[in-house]
Amino acid sequence: MSVNKVIILGRLGQDPELKYTPGGAPVCNFSLATTEAWTDKSGQKQEKTEWHRIVVWGKLAELCNQYLAKGRQAFIEGRLQTRSWDDKDGNKRYTTEINASTVQFIGGQASDRSEKNFDSSMGQGAAPMDMNQDYKVSTDAQFASDDIPF
């Protein structure tokens, strides 16, 4: 038995990039930063940021492109995937990315740093976005984290 599951919460380092495969399937790529902070033995605050490549497919890719932007916070669930290709000089190159199955948009628009919480993946309920569902995206700017019943 094996498990390949990744769960991260971070901020976008760039605006999402939406492309379409030759077959017409939407695919969205963006980077997400997660930061760890700690105090070292000498009392100095330390910080380390990890960058993650995120790939999203289908309708969810189009929604990510529409609602996410640089600086916006997102909660991602998916699986790790490593792929390879040959660069222009014939060298074998590798990248490891997170193939997202669930994306929750956290907080307001990237430029809106207010206390209001806009989670467009949740709408009225608490169900996260799943790649195999149709979506009803809430655009209620008055939605606050206090409105969540748990």
Image (spheres, rainbow, N blue to C red):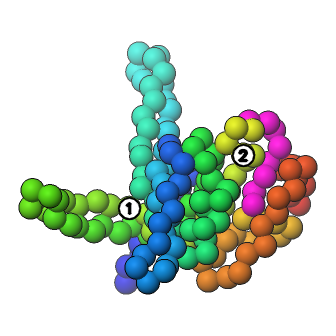
| Residue behind mark 2 | 109
Which residue sits at x=87%, y=56%? 140
Residue, x 75% and y 60% (percent of image)?
120
Distance of mark 1 from mark 2, alpha carbons?
A: 25 Å
Main SS, magenta residues: loop
Residues packed near mark 1 inside 10 Å, few (<14), some (14 to 19) or many (20 plus): some
**Residue 39 vs residue 105, the one in the foreground:** 105
Q: Residue 111: x percent and y percent?
A: 70, 38
Q: Residue 148: name its quadrant.
A: bottom right
Q: Is residue 31 left or right of residue 138?
A: left
Mark nearest the camera among 1 and 2 is 2
Q: What is the secondary structure assignment of the residue under circle 2? A: loop
Chain-order first, disc 1 or disc 2: 1
* Residue segment shown in magenta: 113-120
Q: Does the magenta stretch include residue 114?
A: yes
Residue at the (38%, 61%) spot, across then down: 97
- Using the image, determine if residue 49 lies above or below residue 23: above
Q: What element carries label 1?
A: strand
Task: Report the quarter where the C terminus lies.
Answer: bottom right
Report which residue position mark 1 lands on.
Answer: 97
Amino acid type, mark 2: Gln
Q: Nearer the viewer, residue 4 or 98?
A: 98
Q: In this view, does 116 lie to the left or right of 131?
A: right
Q: For the N terminus, which image quadrant?
A: bottom left
Question: In front here: 82 or 149?
Answer: 82
Q: Position of residue 113 (x, y in %)?
A: 74, 36
Residue at x 50% of width, y 45% of height: 14
Against 122, residue 49 (above or below) is: above
